[in-house]
Amino acid sequence: MASLAISSRVQIGGPLHAQWSGIHPAILRGLLCAAFMVVTSIANAGPDNVVINEIMYHPSGDMDELQYVELFNASTKQADLSGWTFSKGVKFVFPPNTKMAAQSFLVVCRNSAEFLKSHGKNIPLAGVFNGHLSHNGEQLELSNSNKEVVDAVKYADSAPWPAAADGRASSLERICPFAPGDNATNWAPSKPPLNELLAGTPGRINDFYSATPPPIITGFSLAPPSPGPRQPVTIGAVVEGSAEINAVTLYFRVAAGPSLSAETALQMKRVSGDEKKGLYEALLPPQAEQRVVRYRIEATDIVGAKRISPAASELQSAFSYSTFLNNNSSAIPWGVVLHPGDKPRASDRQEFSDRPVKSLRGQDIFIYMPPDGGPVQIFDFIEAARRKGGLKLRFLKDQTLRGMSSVNIIFEDSPRYALSEPLSYELFRLAGVPAESTEHIRMWVDGRPRGYQLLFEQPNKSFLVRNRINDGGNLYKYAWYRSGIVDKHEKKTNLTNGHADLLAVLDGLTRMTGVEQWAFIQKNFEVEEFVNYFAVSMCIQNWDGFHNNYFVYHDTEGTGRWQIFPWDEDKTWGDYDGASPKYDWYKLPLTFGMKGSQPPVELRSGVANGGFHEWWREPGYFSGPLLANPQFRQRFLTRLREICTTIFTEEKMGPIIDAMEKRLEPEIPFRARLVGENAAQATARFHSDIQSFRNQLINRRKIILSELQK
């Protein structure tokens, strides 16, 4: 069984005086007091010094089978846990003859096979608990055989509790076993591992273990609050310790474009308070414009206990401020992405699996400057990953962009795509379909201008919350390039739960007919939302969005119904593979997407590749049976008429198109010069694309209303 050796002997007198004769009396006094406190607590420790030492409540990738709770026997005596229980949070009764050696660890987990597979077979396991640890935080209670609470922890998934333990490959680790477990300052996130399955430190010393409580650092301050270029900055913090504070040090680095300076140390001076609690300050030198300063504070007491805030293992391992000025005179926001030189450091822990770790800690920076001259916003320690056509930005949970935790910033292939996507999402929202937030933004990446691009939200849990949807269910993205129902529907949440609900709902849809099928649809689908989705898709000729380009969501914890969200709306408003440069295609049939529909006569002779030809696609898994159901189809046609007379009109959508044209017109020649295009030709193409949207409003709407009359 793994053990932690802590000496219980302190020699006083004799050689001690000679050994410590050069130490300042105040420091010597503090060392002796702290040593006496630790020794006394250990020497007097009984079974009640068994503490909740580590909590893995939200494994990376929602792999809840890897949840566990670790106990530590902090005493010098064996502890008998027979009949002890976890009575709150999870349920577990320790079996008879459960003994913990002094200074040893013991784990209870959710799935013993998965736990041992991930962490190795040498971890001492007491058994498997019932229930699961809440991702949102809850009370854990450990009681002895007399039903007396021995230790309790009420953890949370938000500050002041460590953010890295909430699904980002860290566990919650107790810092000092002799300090209260109900205080967030006595917990730290474990270091990020090489492998997601190895997260945490079960069965071994915690990464940030301290024999005595380390100093607590609070009350951080920045003066001025929003530093500008060439301004000195005073950074302050309140430091409090159980022993006298020995030193407080400020460390800072400066990011300039993609470069990151070496770390500089400044000693902080106590400006008020006493040796155990005081306000400490340091003056940072002025910085040039367009710099990002990262800083952290280290406090050490006279017995050597140390804390660095923020912790090196946190998602945000330093505090930040920028000296960017908002000189934005455009009609759209400006954005700056920086990839500073540091890379996440690998752990030296042994691996039991070769599963790679991804996106455990971000090191990138995003600066956002609104067009109205508002405050510059800094998003530090994010992940700015390259993707086709641009970047995907993943923000920290407590630092989102208007509630969005992940966005895409792209300019992909045809410039028209950057126009058709936001128009499509706007129409979906007007029709009552939850759709991604979008905007255009002028970008710089590592000092290089990129011109205007499209920023749009990534559907995820934050998207659900922002749209007031319960976020505990199953979210699927349809991937056209895969095969089979399961492979094509890529699961984005609850990754370990499988696709059983998706297969069941599609089986019910295809197996049933008539009245029975309609009853099934009403019970299992947000009918009006699906009706609106298909109606808008028909208006904008979203030929690729009936069998493809969507997210579906099953609200397993709330309504129990399925919802649908649009995605990838670039080839819409008259565009398709091989479309006319004038985008003057207006004739997508109203039967498109429903089960039994056939391609038009002029296409049938050329249909190939599994039914694909130009804009033609076979009915989708959802669209086919839904649009063929008589009751659903009647609602679809009725709603299609309503949309074409209320929102898919020149009066409603015309001003939206006009406003987009006005906002972006100055951006076209700016971008053209960056990419070596003729500015006049790019501007002419832009206005032609804008006019094609107006033409769609007139001609597509006319055809739909005409077909509805038939």
Image (cartoon, grey):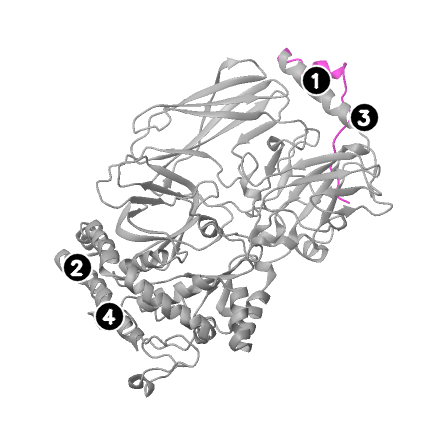
**Front one among 94 and 425:** 425
Q: Amino acid at mark 1?
A: Cys
Mark 3 to mark 4: distance in Å? Answer: 87 Å
Labels 3 and 2: the sequence-earlier one? 3
Magenta segment, prevailing SS (helix, strand or loop)? loop
- 2 and 4 marks in contact (CB < 8 Å): no
Residue located 64% across and 22% down the image: 303
Q: Circle 4 is placed at which residue position?
A: 702
Q: Is residue 188 magenta?
A: no
Residue 33 is tagged as: 1
Labels 3 and 4: the sequence-earlier one? 3
Q: Circle 3 is placed at which residue position?
A: 44
The label nearer to you, 3 versus 2, is 2
Residue located 38% across and 76% down the image: 617
Q: Amino acid at mark 4?
A: Lys
The label nearer to you, 1 versus 2, is 2
Labels 1 and 2: the sequence-earlier one? 1
Q: Amino acid at mark 2?
A: His
Q: Amino acid at mark 3?
A: Asn
Q: Secondary structure at mark 1?
A: helix
Q: Circle 2 is placed at which residue position?
A: 687
Q: Secondary structure at mark 3?
A: loop
